[in-house]
Image (cartoon, rainbow, N blue to C red):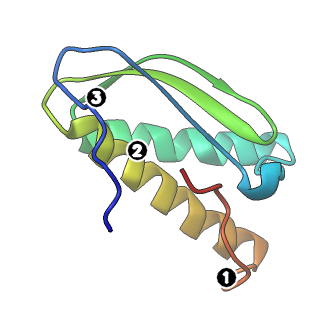
Amino acid sequence: MPRALRSDFAGEIYHALNRGNARNNIFFKEGDFEAFERVIREGLEKYPVDLIAYQWMSNHWHMVLSPQEDKAMSAFLGWVTMTHTQRYHAHNKTTGYGHVYQGR
């Protein structure tokens, strides 16, 4: 059964978060945070979403977002987590070793 869709309406404000699988760290050094911020910047160029506030921690992150179009936030977050996961595995040479992020 497919998972239920979440609200994602233009002009609303949402809190989004994600954390490492099994609460493991996903950021180990300053460069990891910087790489994630590059992914965020790229995503904000691709998708009509306003980033209002954020907090990155060693094993999870929080963002306050406002999509400019319906469904833009879901597309943005999906792209960010997929892209970050791919780059994380490529950088750490862990492709095929499992999930980076915990399932919802």
Residue sitting at x 25%, y 15%:
12
Residue 95: image tag = 1
The residue that mark 2 highlights is 77
Q: Are marks 2 and 1 in contact (CB under 8 Å)?
A: no
Q: Nearer the viewer, residue 19 or 46?
A: 19
In the shown orientation, is residue 81 left or right of residue 50?
Answer: right
Position of residue 52 relative to residue 93, above or below, is above
Disc 1 crowd, CA 10 A, few/some/many (<14, 14-19, 20+): some
Q: Secondary structure at mark 3?
A: strand
Kindly identify the amino acid type of the residue bearing the numbered disc 1: Thr
Kindly identify the amino acid type of the residue bearing the numbered disc 3: Val
Between the residue at mark 2 and the residue at mark 1, the CA separation in whole angstroms equals: 21 Å
Between the residue at mark 3 and the residue at mark 1, the CA separation in whole angstroms equals: 29 Å
Disc 3 crowd, CA 10 A, few/some/many (<14, 14-19, 20+): many
Q: Nearer the viewer, residue 6 or 72?
A: 6
The residue that mark 3 highlights is 49
- How far across and down, in percent of the image, does residue 62 sit? 59, 27
Disc 2 crowd, CA 10 A, few/some/many (<14, 14-19, 20+): some
- How far across and down, in percent of the image, does residue 89 sit? 67, 72
